[in-house]
Image (cartoon, grey):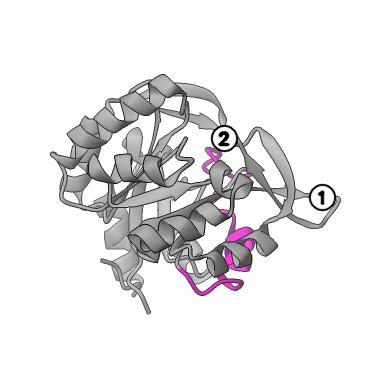
Amino acid sequence: MLAKRIIPCLDVKDGRVVKGVNFVNLRDAGDPVELAATYDREGADELVFLDISASHEGRATMVEVVRKTAGEITIPFTVGGGIASVDDMTRILRAGADKIGINTAAVKNPELITDGARRFGCQCIVVAIDAKFNPAWGEWEVYIHGGRTPTGIKALEWVRRVESLGAGELLLTSMDADGTKDGFDVPLTRAVSESVGIPVIASGGAGKIEDFYEVFQEAKADAGLAATIFHYKELTIHDVKEDLKKKGVEIR
């Protein structure tokens, strides 16, 4: 069994870290380079940067943020948002990222997953999936454009396809749980974890220390990602890891 990972997430808009609830009502949470360096010192296993503006100006900003961050940290970090081609991937990796996250572009052009995996290796390609429960279906639907656009694609079908195309990891965000601090979406995470053989990073809803144990034990996630509780010092990474150790969970 792979050791479990604790991963802070930095949603970056116009060069600043922001956080909201259910993908809206964003508020400032600080400087991304400073936060990244802090999380590295505090024992984070990895970092995820998501450029949520992903405009042309945002992309230029993000490349510079990635470059500055790479000089400040020693842990791996994934960068996503607005990456739509192998050239975009190359630019971000050259700036210092270790992995590439793709979401909207993967849905629109699934072959991008395969192209990226062939060029950089499967371990480099993280497919991010924003999923929301669709009551009419009785299961989850994939959304794109930062959670604004429903796709009509069933999440469990999509994750299996993504794996077959060469993705090395999934970053699974529950839109229903995002920012609520009511706990990770265990049913969604478990369903996805049981559908694929690649690692699943659970995202959305972390609010208390017990939530991490639950998502690892009950939902079979390989990593727990959180933003709000770490950015605003409600919990530290050390706190979470110590709690997991006491409960017998193997961590990095």
Q: In this rendering, does residue 201 appear at all?
A: no
Residue range of the region highlighted in magenta in the rendering = 176-198
Question: Looking at the picture, does residue 126 appear above or below residue 190?
Answer: above
Main SS class of the magenta portion in the image: loop
Q: Quadrant of the C terminus?
A: bottom left
Describe the element under mark 2 as helix, strand or loop.
loop
Specify the label residue 135 is tagged with: 1
Q: Is residue 57 visible?
A: yes
- Residue for point 29% across, 32% down: 63
Q: Residue at x 54, y 65 (%)?
A: 165
Residue at position x 57%, y 32% in the image: 23
Foreground mark, 1 or 2, reads 2
Res 195 quadrant in image = bottom right
Query: Can you identify the residue that label 2 sits on?
Result: 146
Residue type at mark 2 is Gly
Neighbour tally class for label 2: few under 14, some 14-19, many 20 plus, Cα within 10 Å: some
Task: Say whether residue 137 is left or right of residue 242.
Answer: right
Pointers 1 and 2 in contact (CB under 8 A)? Answer: no
- Residue 55 bears which disc, if any? none
How far from the left and from the top, in percent, is residue 213?
43, 63
In magenta stretch: residue 184:
yes
Q: Position of residue 180 (x, y in %)?
A: 56, 39
Residue at 41% in and 47% down: 86
